[in-house]
Amino acid sequence: MSNAESQGMSALEIRLQRESVLPDHEARRKELTGPHINTAKFAQPAAVAKPTPSEKKKKPLLETRALHKSYRKGRLTIPVLRGVDFAAEEGKITSIIGQSGSGKSTLLHLMGTLDTPDDGEIHFANTRIDRLSSRQRDSLRSRAFGMIFQFYHLLPELSTLENVLTPIMISHGMWRYWSARKQFRKRAEELLEMVGLSHRTTHKPRELSGGEMQRTAIARALIAQPRILLADEPTGNLDEKTGGEIMEILKRLNREQNLTIVMVTHDSSIAAQGHDIIRLTGGRVEKQ
Ligand SMILES: Nc1ncnc2c1ncn2[C@@H]1O[C@H](COP(=O)(O)OP(=O)(O)OP(=O)(O)O)[C@@H](O)[C@H]1O
């Protein structure tokens, strides 16, 4: 038995350590944070008072201005977004709806800093975020954004609990994670309980149903206490009943924890469960 195993480290923890994914967490943290931006200010405030309805009508938490994005395929340029003005208010669920190919996922990915626009601006918490370096974007995503996707994107060789812990291991670095592992595991277990998966913590993704995988992905998205949840077709791969259960979890998070949610869907009955609905047509937001 290795030293790490004798200390009770999980397979994932041992692998991260052996592969020196994060050999020096302080250096890695500096690398991720970068010199020009203090991403700590994006973090969820410790105690968030529930806003009254009038307070909810304030400046958007996430906003785009005249956003443009085209894809290039050989000599062909495919314009997808042609000047999108979008705003998601804090404490609300905003649904993005539109036909297949209208650019919903493209918009969500740009706002989540997974890709960069050709032109236009993206603002989050009153700070422009479309010109950040890739390190700064990594840092912002790990501190402030939770993301869930249609196909869950869980790591197949890890247990449910380990999948939920992965963002913390990566963002904190192995040693900082290790020193506070009990606290992180407790939080991961609480999140899994919150999504109704206490009885599945040691299961691998292949041993879970679609709904259970999406619940795991929601718990993983929340482990770093994000300020906003970006959801790309969160019910798109699920039957109606299971999709409804996932929506109930998202609405409960919004109601009870004031979590801001931006959700892409092609399903109008799912979109209608949000507070605001934005429709993309012809690469722009359709006027309501
Ligand atoms: N990486 C890429 N390279 C080239 N074209 C792309 C790329 N990603 C998306 N596209 C194209 O951009 C357009 C918009 O795609 P996007 O996935 O944003 O639409 P969507 O509204 O989310 O569609 P769906 O509802 O079918 O998921 C599509 O025509 C797609 O083929």
Image: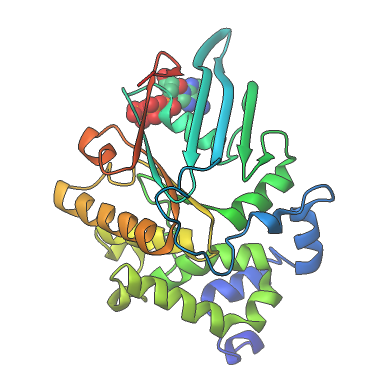
Split into quadrants, the picture shows ligand 1 in the one at top left
Q: Position of residue 43 (x, y in %)?
A: 62, 59
Q: Is residue 184 above or below residue 110?
A: below
Tell me if 56 is positioned left or right of 201 in this view: right
Of residues 5 and 108, the one nearer the viewer is 108
Of residues 155 and 103, the one nearer the viewer is 103
Residue that lies at the very extreme toward the right in this rendered image: 35
Q: Position of residue 230 (x, y in %)?
A: 46, 46
Q: Residue at x 68, y 68 (%)?
A: 173
Of residues 206 and 101, the one nearer the viewer is 101
Residue that lies at the very extreme toward the top in this rendered image: 75
Kindly tell me whether residue 175 is visible in this rendering.
yes
Residue that lies at the very extreme toward the front in this rendered image: 54
Q: Residue at x 79, y 55 (%)?
A: 31
- How many discs appear? 0
Kindly tell me whether residue 9 is visible in this rendering.
no
Q: Residue at x 36, y 46 (%)?
A: 151
- How is the protein colored in the picture? rainbow
Q: Quadrant of residue 200?
A: bottom left
Tell me if 123 is positioned left or right of 268 in this view: right
Q: Quadrant of residue 127?
A: top right
Q: Is residue 288 above or below residue 16?
A: above
User: The C terminus is located in which quarter?
Assistant: top left
Q: Residue at x 31, y 55 (%)?
A: 251
Tell me if 280 is positioned left or right of 185 in this view: left
Of residues 4 and 181, the one nearer the viewer is 181
User: The N terminus is located in which quarter?
Assistant: bottom right
